Amino acid sequence: MRGGGPDSMRPVRDAKGGAGVSIRPGDLLDTLKIVWTASPRHTLTYAATSLLGSALPAANLYVGKLLLDEVARSVQGNVTYQSLLTLLAFQVGLTVLGSLLSTFQGAAQQLLGDSLQHGVSRRILDKAAGMSVEAFENAETYDKLQQAYREVGTRPLGVATQLIGLVGAVVTLVSVGALIAQLGFWVLPLVLLASLPGVWVSNRFGVENYRMLRWQTHDARVQNYLGSLLTSDTLVKEVRLFGFEPYLLRRWREYYLGFRKQLEDIVRRRALWGFGASLLSALLIGVASALILRRAADGMIGVGDFSVFILGIAQVQGTVSGFLNGLSGIYQNLLYMRNLFEFLELPDRDLNAGETWSGPIHTIEFQDVGFRYPLTERDVLRGVNFTVRRGQALALVGENGAGKTTTVKLLTRLFEPTSGRILLNGLDSARFSPRSVQKEMSIIFQDFGQYQMSVRDNVAIAEVERLADRPGVEQAIEQAGAAFVGSLPDTLDTPLGRLFQGGRQLSGGQWQRLALARLYFRDASVLVFDEPTAALDARAEFETMEALRGQARDRITFLISHRFSTVRLADHILVLDGGVVTEAGSHAELLARGGKYASLYRLQASGYGPEGAP
């Protein structure tokens, strides 16, 4: 699905406001390095067979000329049958050789393409794995990822094959051109000129089409998203109930019509220019043919020479077009490769950089911590201070957008503070590698993962080194209260979700139970619960809170919840408002203070009627 909305008719510009994208001097060499690294053996095989095959057209033309001349002479009785068979054998041999080279060339190209698909995909996935969480929350960065992945295997192969094709085209042109040049001084230049108009048209509109597709990446993603809403198994109930399918279809079609309008304009102009180029080429070939016919009428060339001209026209035109289109194709493919290089050039975050943290975390202290997203001017957090010790639970309370989740991302080293410090056991956490610190932390996010894998994998991926630890998985499932696992067809080995055949779909509460089991499976000294009971019913929530009390006794626990029945379990509560801590204290202290916390508590308690608060 592709498309463009109303904005897609604006002039194509790059993300910095420029007139487009351009390749860099080292892009060609970098692309060839990628191809060579993918498979040196198949690269050499493809190059050797291509270059050998480039000399065959001239050889075929020359043998064909000799054969026709011999046939013409045989009318006069000056040629033996044996000599004709010898020339025919040469011609058949060239045909067999061409087929053999083509077979090896095709096999090498296919295997090289597969190696490139894997190699470039691996580079992109390695890069994505090393990028910061902030990068994934940036739309421009995500566009670069999509652009790189869309052309993952074809573009580097295209550059290599076209570059080899250029060398082969030179071999073909020199050899075939030498034969045609013998027919007259002006014949070869006219044939060469006849090839240029069509190539110019192809090059001009190829680049224009590339630019259109590049800058419709965002619109295409929006259109694909709209289409996914109409085909989602999880959203189909809500879409049907509210009946907004026509709205989604209308928006989806608006993007398509915008794209179609641009496409029609390019196709119309390309057709007109292409027709003009064909007329000019036909005129030039007509002039060259007239010159050859004049020499034939004067008895200056024979039947074999005339065959070289007739067959050579198509050969030269095809080779010249291939050569110039190859230059254009290399340029266009390098434009697409620039997408890949721009993505690979994005800054990395080495999660293993720094000292290695070892041992449990006993205290966590935020000292005047602040955070601001790159390229923005608003602080998400400002001057946050608190200390929490082992055996204590700290709750973060506030309205949506107050900074609760950002605080957790800083705590778990997914983000780094833009001001202030985070101390672990009195030591600056910035000294230590994020990965080693994260091993002492386990978390359930509000938007927890629902992995289309087995039950065992859904739990054990919290520590992949322990995937075979069945007792550990069963214990975590028991702690999370996920007793439903025992009723599944293959218990721990039951595949989950609807993405793959045979998967069993779970309810929202069951998925959340597994996410809690994932949290418990990691033997961490810091537990973070981000809305841990949002999808659970009242009984399940009570059971989860009881289990949480037991787990929190010898650990540091962070709680984020809008349910005060969960929050009141905490020893200390922070109230965040606009990224600033406005209140701090225990549940009783904050109620007695009568501030924002008390207001939110009473507001939620009123929903329970006169029988009591949560």
Image (tube, rainbow, N blue to C red):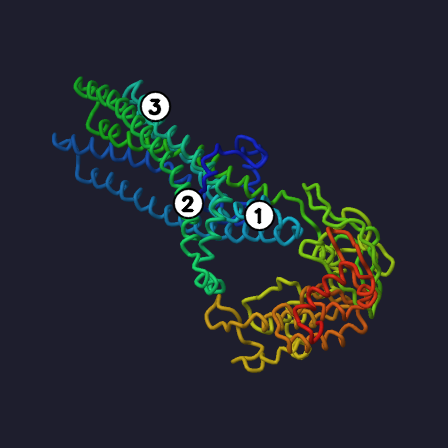
| Front residue of this view, candidates 610 and 557 | 610
Residue 356, quarter of the rendered image: bottom right
Q: Are marks 2 and 1 in contact (CB under 8 Å)?
A: no
Residue 350: x and y, percent?
71, 51
Q: Are marks 2 and 3 in contact (CB under 8 Å)?
A: no
Q: Amino acid at mark 1?
A: Tyr
Residue 18, quarter of the rendered image: top right
Q: CA distance from mark 1 to mark 3?
A: 45 Å
Q: Residue 19 vs residue 537: left or right?
A: left
394 lies above or below 280: below
| Front residue of this view, candidates 27 and 254 | 254
Residue 192: x and y, percent?
34, 25
Mark identifier at residue 142: 1
Q: Residue 534 vs residue 82: left or right?
A: right
Residue depicted at 66% across the width and 74% down the height = 541
Q: Residues within 10 Å of mark 2 (few under 14, many from 20)?
A: some
| Front residue of this view, candidates 193 and 472 | 472
Q: Quadrant of the C terminus?
A: bottom right
Q: Is residue 72 visible?
A: yes
Label 2 vs 1, first from the N-terminus: 1
Mark identifier at residue 254: 2
**Residue indicated by mark 3:** 193
Front: mark 2 or 3: 2
In the structure shown, which secondary structural element does the residue marked by tag 1 occupy? Answer: helix
Residue 205: x and y, percent?
40, 32
Q: CA distance from mark 2 to mark 1?
A: 23 Å
Q: Residue 502 vs residue 383: left or right?
A: left
